[in-house]
Every structure is written in C-alpha cells, then in structure tokens.
Image (cartoon, grey):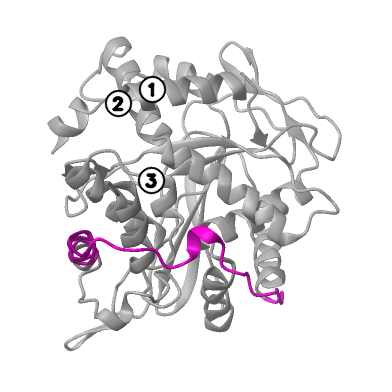
Amino acid sequence: VVAAMNAWQDPEEDQALAEYTASQGKESYIWNPKGKPVDYQNSQFYSHKYCLTQETTDKLIAKTAEWRLPVNSLLLGAFLRAVVKLDSHDLRVTSTNNNFHATTEDSTPSKSPIIQIPTSGRIYPGVDASNVVSSFAQNLALSFTPPQPDEDWQALLNRIHQVIQNGIASGIDRAQTRQMGMIFKENIALENGEIPEHTLPMFRSALKSNLYFPYTGHTHIKTQYGSVNVTDYQAGGINAPGTVDILQEVFDGRLHMFASYDYNFFALSEIDNLMTEYIAQIEELVSLTIQPEQPSKSQQPLPTNTAIESTLRQVTEEICHYPISADEMDLDLEADLGVDSLERIRIVTHLEKLYGKVDRQGLLSCRSVQEMASTLSQSFKG
C-alpha cells in the first residue's frame, strides 16, 4: 500500500499545485490573538471538547440538502466568520534565527486568511488504505477572501465551496503531499528514526497557516455493541508549535468538535473565545430560511448508462457498508444516507481506478448516487 502511494505522481496535479502556489504567493496567515512569537522547538498539545446539540446537528445536516453543499463547506464558512471577527492581531511571519515573530496590524485582516484543510491521505487511484491503522494525510493550504460585511451566507458559502472543490478536483492535495514527502526524502536524514530537531525550523518557516480544519467525518460508531455501551467519544492530535487543529466528527447524532491546540502558544480562554464564536456562527447559519434552489440544467435528470449506474451503486455500497435500494438512488447522500465528505472522496477516487480520469469536481458536487451516475455517464457519452 505504502509503495503504491509513494509511486503515485500525476504531472497535471503537479502543474496545478505550481500554478496555485504561484498565485497564492509567499504570504502566510497565523492566527495569533496576542501577537506572541513562536520561539521554541517543542509543542505541548491539549484537546478541548465542544459539542453541538442534536437539534443543531440535525438542522446543520438538513441544510446540506437545502443548499446542495457539503457540511464541511458550511462549517468552514462559520469558522472563517469566527476567525475574522476575533482576529485583532494579524501575524506576518518573519524569520529571525528561524523563529516566528509577530507584527501587529489593523484589527481587520487586510489579506486573505489561509486555512490548512487536511483531506483524505488514505485514498489514491488504485490504492485505498482506509482499513490500515496508521497516520495518513493530504492537505490543502487554501486562501480565502475574508467574509465581507454585506455578504450574505449563501454567497459566502458558495464561494468557499468553490475554492475547496477546485483544490480537490485538481488534485493539489495529493500533489502537495507528494512534494512534501520528496523534500523529506531528499533533504532530511533521520536520526534514530526521528526528524532531527535542527531541521524543524525549516518546515516551520514554510508554514502557510497555523489553523487546521480537517474534513468532517462520521464516526459510524454505534452506542451499543452487545453488552458494551459506548457512552462518549474523544479525539485529538499533535501538530506543529503554535497551531490549532479543529477535529470534527458526528457521534451519537451530535457534532463533536475537538480543538487540539499548543498550550505553550494559546491560552484556553483564547480557544474558548474562538470556539464559542464558531458555534454561535453555526447556530446563526442553521436558523436561516432560504428560498429553495431551482434545479439548474446540470441538476436535471440525464440519461444514465445502466452498467455505470450498477457499478457506482456497488462502489457506494462497498464504501458505506450498507445496501442502497433503487428507491434510495435519488436520496441526498449526506442528509439522507449519511455519506460524509471523506466517503464521497473515496467513492470518486475509486471511480478513477475503474475509469481513469473522471470529472472529479462534477462528481463531488452531486447530491445523490443517481446524480453521480448521470454525471459519470455523460463523461463517457459517445
């Protein structure tokens, strides 16, 4: 599995990454409420738990069908609004003895926030390590125009979603992961199986953002297994010094959010302020009433190749671990069938293995298995 992942390379994805990083420039975005320097080597991480109510979680999931947007895009919109609202210090990264130092600027960010968005490092065309117990990651370091004062939620969420979809569709998360791996391989000599401390500043100086917002998943953990009751769920991670990693999973009908943060850099009160504002933004989002979207031409039913439809149905069943009836083909993948964003990436990547190049962006935008079958059929029409 690892050998196949290491061998993966797509020149088109490498080119897409080069073009995106060139347009992004060398700017970094560090959320740093108190303007503190990161002048130490070793981080100390603590994970603090927050939860949405089941009612708010249900409303959030329902919004994915109403707005035809994945929950990850909705949550990122709320998170960006919270970050920008609380960002009273804007840190530009300067290098002095390979350490980060803060320059305090205006209370309103003048540059685009950059968010690190880990996707699914377990999936490549022809390789699926979903059942392997290990650490895998791909990453998108994406720049976003700050939410504007007069910008409504729907416009904000649609443009955020487009930025994410463009990154995934062009494969820059895979290309970025490969590029970083090659840097490690060619420039770092491990000492006793570990990265030498003296090389860490090199990677820290290349950090585009200290905010990590991984793709949201569904644990699919039941609350009871025979006589064993599962009463709670806990997650956490360790990252670079001065970072905060927002891990989010649905468990027992509620969205659990874990802020894993370096407490050498952040005070718990700062994390509490961020997460409280983030949850307030989510609650505002789910309370909105919107006009039902009229199906566009691309969303109208299209002729479907029956063989492709059958294959797609089988692939979806294998990944989601439950049968999908004919009546469920038109149901919303996320709101009705519980297929999370990571599982949708797995489905599309598996289709790449079967069919070669596919319309990744078109398939990831589909809201039902039937829509995916129609989109894939149109790709091979004629």
The boundaries of the magenta stretch are 287-316
Q: Badge 1 is on which residue?
A: 14
Determine the residue positioned at 46% across, 31% down: 42
Q: Which one is in front, 350 or 251?
A: 350
Q: Quadrant of residue 222?
A: bottom left
Q: Badge 3 is on which residue?
A: 360
Up-down relation of residue 290 to residue 248 (above or below): below
Q: Which one is in front, 137 or 37?
A: 137
Amino acid type at image mark 3: Arg
Determine the residue positioned at 64% across, 48% down: 159
Q: Position of residue 50 (x, y in %)?
A: 55, 67
Report, in whole angstroms, how far the alpha carbon at label 3 lies from the one at label 1: 16 Å
Q: Quadrant of residue 211?
A: top right
Q: Residues within 10 Å of mark 2 (few under 14, many from 20)?
A: few
Q: From where the camera sits, is residue 239 visible?
A: no
> Does residue 324 appear left or right of residue 267 in this picture?
left
